[in-house]
Image (tube, helix red, strand yellow):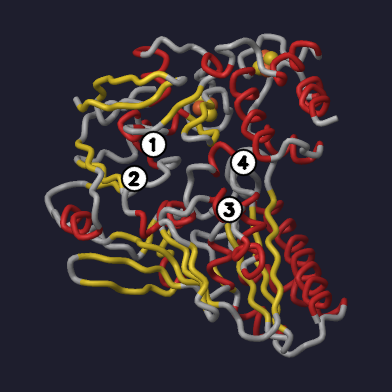
Amino acid sequence: MPIAHDFDYIKPATMEQTIELLNQENKRISILAGGTDLCNMLKNGFRVPDLMIDIKALHELNVIKDNNTDIFIGALVTFSELINSDIVKEKLYILWEAAHKVASQGVRNRATMIGNICSAVACMDSAATLLVHNASVHVKSVNGERKIPVNEWFVDNKKTACLNNELVTGVTLEIPQKKYASAYEKQMRYAGEDLSQSNVGILVQEDKTYRIAFGAVGPTPKRSLKIEHFLQGKELTDSIIAEARQMIETVIAPITDVRSSKEYRMQMTKVMFERGLRTAIERLNNLI
Amino acid sequence: MKKINFILNGEKRQIYVEASDILLEVLRQKMGLTSPKCGCDNGDCGACTIILNGKSVRSCLIFAIEIDGMEILTVEGLSKNGMTPLQESLLTHNSFQCGYCAPGMILSATELLKVNPKPSVEEIKECIAGNLCRCTGYQPIIDAITDLTK
Ligand code: FES
Ligand code: FES
């Protein structure tokens, strides 16, 4: 399907130039990296930009950097690059797992994680990872740089805290300094292209602190502090897990849509929560 | 209109495109290459797969203007000097019926075999998970690729 309207295209060579270009109030601007979402949005007329800025010449954004206590992932890193990264596999296992579950190889070769969180559809695969690793999103504009904690990033379905003149340059994910393990669970109808019906991210640490994030079961992905506090310091016996499972009914608000009914989502989220929690614990025990 | 230069199946090419032109349409309509097909037009089916700078991608999700300076391979280029062993194997196994999914399947599997010459059946399935085929039930395609790993 052709795109029904014309727009300008610029591929700036430097960050400064990009930031300047973004700072035009009278223009609707779309930023292009992998384009796997943007292209569809333009075809469907959901976005009608005057200008498209292709940031793929900003090579400094194509990095995965290990700073020991945190890891920076730049805006141009694709899901395939995440899958092939030893740093990600070793330290951000949940992201490594989640990246495999994004669409298909042909999409992962283009699509970026930053694009995923900028589109911010509630069912995105990256959010759970970012939430359990206390990530912050780096944005830049003519007014300087700021870091937005990921729990403030997702404002609503398809809405983020990013301002019109800001460019997302990457994310920093915190690496726990105690032994930890994580797991990602995604329920979908079939592999290869489907979006989540529901997803759960779990991170457990050796001191029995737990981080739990839910996606696709509310307008924005979010952590459940309520369940985390309940589990804090506890040995995970069958009855504790059952109790935590029951609490899910009070912390998520799934809806019915083409992919599944809210009742099914609720049930599957409980199942995946338990499965993820047990997987993460098992992985942690293998480390200790 | 902007002039872009790229390498298409080993040949230098130069054309004028609008920013809004989709690569798949440019390849089919302006460059006359019909192996990339339009199945879903939104990234789900894999029929439009091409190899861009060595990686399989969906040409229905790429703006033609983005590929300035890049290198594209389609099935036309892949079999310029005759069929590849993969294509021979697909033929022997009678892997396709209507063939609409074939170019995408071939290119996805070509990419896989290049980085991983002996993939497991699981890896093969994972690789073509995003290439939908409505005719064959996938088994003859998987068999043909598996055969090459023996
Ligand atoms: S036509 Fe491109 S993925 Fe279906
Ligand atoms: S052979 Fe017909 S779609 Fe695959």
Instruction: Give the camera-side residue of A202 and A270.
Output: A202
| Mark 3 / mark 2, whichever is N-terminal | 2
Mark 3: secondary structure: loop
Alpha carbon separation for disc pair 1 and 3: 27 Å
| Marking on residue A255 | 3
Residue A144 located left or right of residue B84: left
Chain-order first, disc 2 or disc 4: 2
Q: Dot 2 corresponds to which residue?
A: A32
The reply to whether dot 4 and dot 1 touch (C-beta < 8 Å) is no
Q: Which is more foreground, mark 4 or mark 1?
A: 1
Q: Is residue B107 above or below residue A253?
A: above
- Find residue A39 and name its label: 1
Q: CA distance from mark 2 to mark 1?
A: 9 Å
Label 3 Cα neighbours within 10 Å, binned few <14 / some 14-19 / many ≥20: some
Q: Chain of mark 2?
A: A
Q: Which label sits in the foreground, 1 or 3?
A: 1
Q: Chain of mark 1?
A: A
In the structure shown, which secondary structural element does the residue marked by tag 2 occupy?
A: strand
**Mark closer to the chain start, 3 or 4:** 4
Residue A182: x, y in percent?
Answer: 69, 70
Circle 3: residue type: Ile
Asked if badge 2 and badge 1 are on a common chain, one would say yes
Specify the amino acid type for callout 2: Leu
Label ID, residue A194: 4
Q: Quadrant of residue A36?
A: top left
- Nearer to the camera, B114 or B99: B114
